[in-house]
Amino acid sequence: MAPSMISLAFFVLLIVGSANAQLSTNFYSSSCPKLSSTVKSTLQSAISKEARMGASILRLFFHDCFVNGCDGSILLDDTSSFTGEKNANPNRNSARGFDVIDNIKTAVESACPGVVSCADILAIAAADSVAILGGPTWNVKLGRRDAKTASQSAANTAIPAPSSSLSTLTSMFSAVGLSTKDLVALSGGHTIGQARCTNFRARIYNETNIDTSFATTRKSSCPSTSGSGDNNLAPLDLQTPTSFDNNYFKNLVNKKGLLHSDQQLFNGGSTNSIVSGYSTNPSSFSSDFAAAMIKMGDIKPLTGSNGEIRKNCRKTN
């Protein structure tokens, strides 16, 4: 090949390479062909031991993506140079599953060392958790790299609180490029998992848009006094707390949303019709949830030469 052709080919490669600094579903197909099976088998064993872990991993991904993008920053322990996200208000005493991500990372490192980011492992594990618990499947886009820092202050301001109003929820999702439909669909992730008494006490004791027998049931393990039983757990979906289905939306229609922020989605506002639709059409919820998860996974990823591929998900290299 003539020198000019070589330089042209190199130039084209540069252009294509930079244009492809996007996420793709086959990013590791040659560099780590066993990635999918490695993640799934390790995660399956964790969820078999404790079904709630699926919800915990899904929540970790959500809390990662909302804070400076899906960059694995939530996984970093505090260091002398930054205070990380693990002890931010939305995560302290509640974010969990870090050890499961560590176990998956160890298994992946043994299959293909130094190749797969912690941010991508978390994205795959979140999708697998939903599938293992009976929810929809989707092709996860990959190619994220890991952040070298984390921000407790960003986590304190960017993650919606369970006390949020509908307008606050809508604007916080909009701030990261997610629509109102995405908000309602992603909230359906609360078809699995548990919440702590401290996060639903005000709702069951003070609010009126709540089924009275449901409130009574929840009060039995959540005393009205703050500081008493704060960490007592209750299922976000009282019907099928370890099955990924559309019962969460049926609960909302029946005023049985556990969190204030849940019931806000069906309280006479603009999202009532979306909730009603999902409550009677599980397949429309499934497809919208999968689409919203892909969209959330696209929030500000680090690609190309940005960030790094961490060896240990808890600390930078």
Image: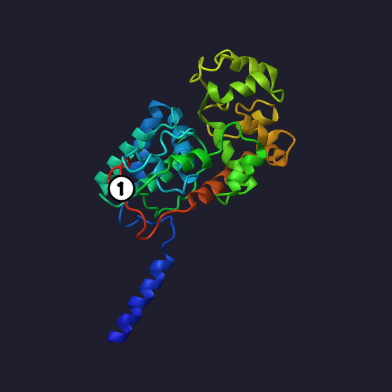
Q: Quadrant of residue 166?
A: top right
Q: Nearer the viewer, residue 203 or 143?
A: 203
Give the x, y percent position of residue 208: 72, 23
Name of the residue lying farthest toward the right: 268
Q: Is residue 144 left or right of residue 160?
A: left
Q: Quadrant of the N terminus?
A: bottom left
Residue at screen point 38% across, 39% down: 83
Q: Is residue 107 left or right of residue 204?
A: left
Residue at screen point 27% across, 51% down: 114
Residue at screen point 56% across, 14% down: 223
Name of the residue lying farthest toward the front: 81
Coloring scheme used: rainbow
Residue type pointed to by label 1: Arg
Q: Secondary structure at mark 1?
A: loop
Residue at screen point 39% across, 39% down: 84
Q: 268 above or below 35?
A: above
Q: How many marks?
A: 1
Q: Quadrant of residue 281?
A: top right
Q: Is residue 163 left or right of residue 300?
A: right
Give the x, y percent position of residue 315: 30, 42
Q: 15 above or below 269?
A: below
Q: Nearer the viewer, residue 65 or 3?
A: 65
Give the x, y percent position of residue 95: 44, 32
**Tag 1 residue:** 310
